[in-house]
Image (spheres, grey):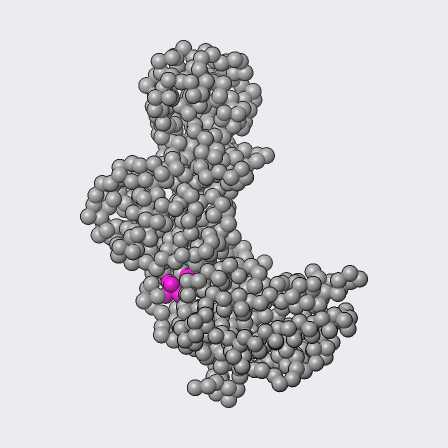
Amino acid sequence: MALNAKTLPDDEFFFGHKACAGCGGSLAVRAALKVLDPNAVAALPAGCMSAVGFNFPQLSFANNAMITPFAATASVLTGIEAGLRAQGIKPDDCTVVGFAGDGGTADIGLQALSGAIDRNDDVLYICYDNEAYMNTGIQKSSLTPFGAKTTTTPAGRNAHGCLTQKKNVFEIVAAHGIPYAATASVGYLPDFLRKLERARDIRGTRFIHVIAPCPTGWGCPEADMVDVARDIVDCGLWYLAEYEGPQLSGVPGGQFKLSRNPREFASVEAYLRRQGRFRALTNDEIAQVEAGRDAKWEQIRRDWTA
Amino acid sequence: MRMKRFLSGDEAFAEGVRLARPQVISAYPITPQTVVVERLSEMVEEGQLAAEYVHVESEHSALSCAIGASATGARTFTATSSQGLLYMAECLTYAAGGRFPIVMMNANRATALPWNIYGDQRDSLALLDHGWVQAYAQDNQEALDLALMAYAVAEDPEVRTPFMVNLDGFALTHTYESVDIPAQEQADAFLPPYDGAGNRFDFANPVNIGYSAGPEFNRYFKHSAHEGMLAAAGAVERAEARFAEMFGRSYPGLIEAVDCEDADIVLVTLGSIAGLARERAAQLRAQGVKAGLVRIRYMRPFPARQIVEALAGAAAVGVLEKDVSFGAEGTVMTNVCSALQQAGNAVPVVNFVGGLGGDDITQAQMRGIFEVLEQIAAGRIAPEDCPRVGFLGVDSVADEFGNPCCEGCGDAGFVAVAGGESEGVRDGACATDAEGGR
């Protein structure tokens, strides 16, 4: 059954936490756990969601859940899944799921994630991407986009923020031949829910990379969080897509599919200018960001199924 | 079926792990641990062991995978050495604080730089404060037996603390000895399945495990971990008593004290080098010298009371270890001296640092070590004139006393004087050492 806002269960599995107002990450976790059934077992490394959700004695997960070492989301997931299976106590509807931030995934956790995909462990890894180390106070990660001001990429006379491009984790993951990977945004919730359902029902390693804006770190009003999460998709700086591995797609090497192929893009400039973190960008730099978007979409439209 | 086999320490330990029936094994290779994970993979492949064998991509993942598995109530095993242990160090505190009774074998090996694959104890002793029970095996039989007892202690409801069994790299891991392998039925009777009660996921009543605890609560968790570690002392005794009853082999608790009751001089050490120390102490006894040996079997929980009792009558004590904390002294030395100081025992203690990076501790050096203690006990060397810490083969006072070194060439006619020039042969030139020695 396709889930939507009407059919999404009322049950809550992540509540009573102390996330900031307008937190995209907590919305991603809340929505995911609604889709994944009560028997989901969650593992979270250091990061926003563990910092706001696991404060003894106020523990915010209604399902089985644990904290992991920062670099170890995927390897702890592997251990949980193997432990349950080895004892013959894994319920049929149990998804072993990890929620790690952008730094926890693309930086310190990438090695363990690669290991889990290599073994094709039966786990679902969700990266909630707020584009910087927000829990420690907005420091650059490898998923921080070009031009974003963080507390370690200050905007000054030399640099106007982050000088590197966002690492392409989705395609790095896909290059392993993973059974299923997807990108999503909390601004397009039905698309995210659909991908969660798909991922839930596939065996082997699954990966979802969901954009989850952080009003505190991005410099936008809390009430705008969902709008911004739509904007980043509409202006083409993020794309909604799926990768189906060779087995699922029947295609050697697997298949990339666009979930959304905008006829025309909304304004990149408007997307950037509504956020404090991009305030120092010049018009030239914005044109550079636009050119990067166009180049990426040229490749996507050439190589991926629309 | 119970049987005798000729096995290396790694192989013997793998047999012990097989008998303990871990349900999840996470494995990453590092010399000189590799043979353990190789044998275990073969046992799983051949159906002798029903375990999920996970090929992790690093030591950090090896231990974190074990943590995840333990959180489901599974019995888990991993093994490492040296840099691998240091690489997973962060996870050691997670395992300890989470009270996950994981058992890990560590092949004691030097730490880089310089890069060196051979044995010393600087890896595990550097992590003494990470909340794991630490045992040090003397021989391969003890290694195998510790594999079983480690689970019994770690899983004890009063303990619930991870357990690291240390085997000297190469000296044990790659050296072959005759080992008695218990029958599986006996092992099963000794070690019932782990139930994980109170510290595992529960689908009927979901739990959050391994949360954060702020300043107002943190101390209670740390105090509880401390209490759990202290309780391991009693659990070791209980496990050894049951072990002796079941298998007919008995172990002496946290330390092994040899001839300490009336000893004037006692050497404290740990691991496989205790064999050579035992031999020398026995020779001295035969010559009428009241020499004793304390072999530390457990560094955590630290056997302070037992060590103080064993050293109560000594006039000079040596601590021999394959470790040093730069700028201070060996970590075993620090721990032993702390225990003595708390007991008000001001016996002179000399630290012998040796065997670093696989360096041999020779018979000559062992003779020198005991000779230094004799000289101090007899008042021929004033304790304040004897350097507190020395490196064997570099600047240890024992080097000057180690010659002449052979039974034939003159223990009885010992002539060296502290600080003076030694007569006789140096290391390597000694006929007894060359003929076989250790």
Left or right of B317, for residue B286: left
In the image, the segment drawn in magenta is A79-84
Residue B111 placement (x, y as % from top left): 50, 40
Q: Is residue B289 above or below residue B244?
A: above
Point out the image quarter for the C terminus of chain B.
top left
In this rendering, the count of numbered labels is 0
In the orientation shown, which residue stands out farthest toward the front? A302
**Location of residue B412 (image quadrant):** top left
Question: Does the magenta portion include B365?
Answer: no
Is residue B377 in view? no
Residue A123 placement (x, y as % from top left): 43, 68
Q: Nearer the viewer, residue A178 or A195?
A: A178
Q: Residue at 43% across / 21% down in the picture? A: B428
**Location of residue A47 (image quadrant):** bottom right
Q: Nearer the viewer, residue A293 or A58?
A: A293
Q: Residue at 49% across / 81% down in the picture? A: A194
Is residue B25 in view? yes
Q: Nearer the viewer, residue B64 or B258?
A: B64
Q: Residue at 66% across / 82% down in the picture? A: A265
Q: Nearer the viewer, residue B305 or B240?
A: B240
In the orientation shown, which residue stands out farthest toward the left? B1
Q: Residue at 45% across / 33% down in the picture? A: B358
The chief SS type of the magenta part is helix
